Image: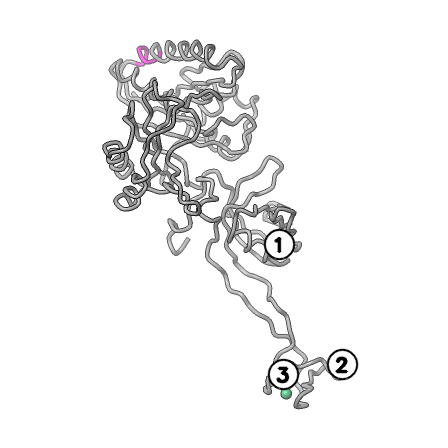
Amino acid sequence: MPLFIGIDDTDHPNGGCTTWTSQILAQLIEAAGADILERRLVRLWPFAPRRTRGNGAVCLVVDTDNTLTILEVVNNWFNSLLEELKKVDSSSHARPGLVILKEQYSDDAYWEAVRHEVAHSNLVENMSNCLLYLHHPEGKDGLIGALAAASWMPKESFTWEAIAWRIESRWGSPRKVSSTCLELLEEFHPDTFMNRDPTRGHGMISPRSPCPVLFGIRARTEQSALAAIEEILSSRGVESAEDYAIFKTNQCSDDHLLGPLKITTIMPPRVHRGGHVTVATTSEKGPLLIRCFKEGGDLNNAVAALEPGDIVEVLGLQSPDGELHLERMRTIALVPRNLNRPLCECGVRYRSSGRNGTLRCKECGSTSLRRWSAEIIGPSGWVEPSADQRRHLAKPVDWMGSID
Ligand SMILES: [Zn+2]
């Protein structure tokens, strides 16, 4: 029988990482004779007020024919986790939560937690469907992410991350991951992505915090994640890992974004100090203020060039104050630009003669019907922030089919 075990909020300023914490539990579950069918890493809504460092929760999908034994393993493990946190996290920064579902009856809790702030009052009714739930004595915060992870039903839009953890005696010391690893990944593992910051050139696979993660490699398929991590771990210049595992993730899935929404610009864009742009628009659901940060690069430029009446399609993160922080945009129909009088055959621009509704050329004297010429700009493809400025939540444009 499958069990969905969700875990969240176990990291604290002195270390910890929910992926590693979940791996310890996975080892105990396996030792008790059950199988781990899948590990899932769920990134939550990035504006959540008590977000953890990686803002990620984990789900272990477990296959067992002895649920009671697994419940006992989980209970004991959770108690020892709380005991350990008392020693290393005296200010109770980490408030772990754990949820076990026997069946994924609904994925509502997942969608709530990746797109909005979840109210604690909503938690109570959701918990009635759990086989077991456990939380830190000082708060239920961890239950939100734990339930979201346990409720995620990955469909076609997901990616993978291979994570290697460090030997405990090395935690907090500089990580030994040679730069040739990045070249290896780029040359031999084309299905891995976001290994390197394209602007500054440095690696993005290793975290900088004192957490137990040695590195994580993102990939589009499970096979490529596995092949990449095995090659990196066996290459020279890389410290030995304690353990590693492959997670199915909702990174680059678009799940966190609202949209696509078709909106009409109603005011000229406002460029604010620092370079970010806001535009008042109207959507099917009413007025919507869209915001694009200066770091958005091409996307920022495209937004700043909008004019009232332009119809565009957008996707973005809903911010706590209801704005849409843009992650992707394409134009559908733009109002004519550069309205002007047409050119005369002689090459000089007509001017309004002020009489008889005609236009007149000052150079050769010819006349024409009173009319305008304008530049018509057709629909564009999707525009996104430059690669080093993406949040790893939106789907990169170059993954999208030409019809999207
Ligand atoms: Zn003329």
Q: Is the CB–ligand 1 distance for label 3 below 8 Å?
A: yes
Q: Position of residue 301 (x, y in %)?
A: 55, 55
Q: Is residue 259 magenta?
A: no
Q: Which residues are magenta?
A: 67-71
Residue flagged by tag 2: what amino acid is it? Gly
Point out the image quarter for the N terminus: top left
Q: Which residue is mark 2?
A: 354
Q: Which residue is mark 1?
A: 265
- Mark toward the start of the polypeptide (1 vs 2): 1
- Spatial CA distance of label 1 from label 3 is 34 Å
Q: Is residue 404 left or right of residue 239?
A: right
Q: Secondary structure at mark 3?
A: loop
Q: Is residue 336 above or below residue 22?
A: below
Residue flagged by tag 1: what amino acid is it? Thr
Q: Position of residue 121 (x, y in %)?
A: 57, 21
- Mark toward the start of the polypeptide (1 vs 3): 1
Judging depth in this view, the residue of 236 and 359 nearest the camera is 236
- Mark toward the start of the polypeptide (2 vs 3): 3
- Spatial CA distance of label 1 from label 2 is 33 Å
Q: Which residue is mark 3?
A: 348
Is the Cβ of the residue at disc 1 closer than 8 Å to that at disc 2? no
Q: Position of residue 61 (x, y in %)?
A: 33, 24
Q: Is residue 39 above or below residue 346?
A: above
In the image, what residue occupies the spot 43% across and 30% down? 208
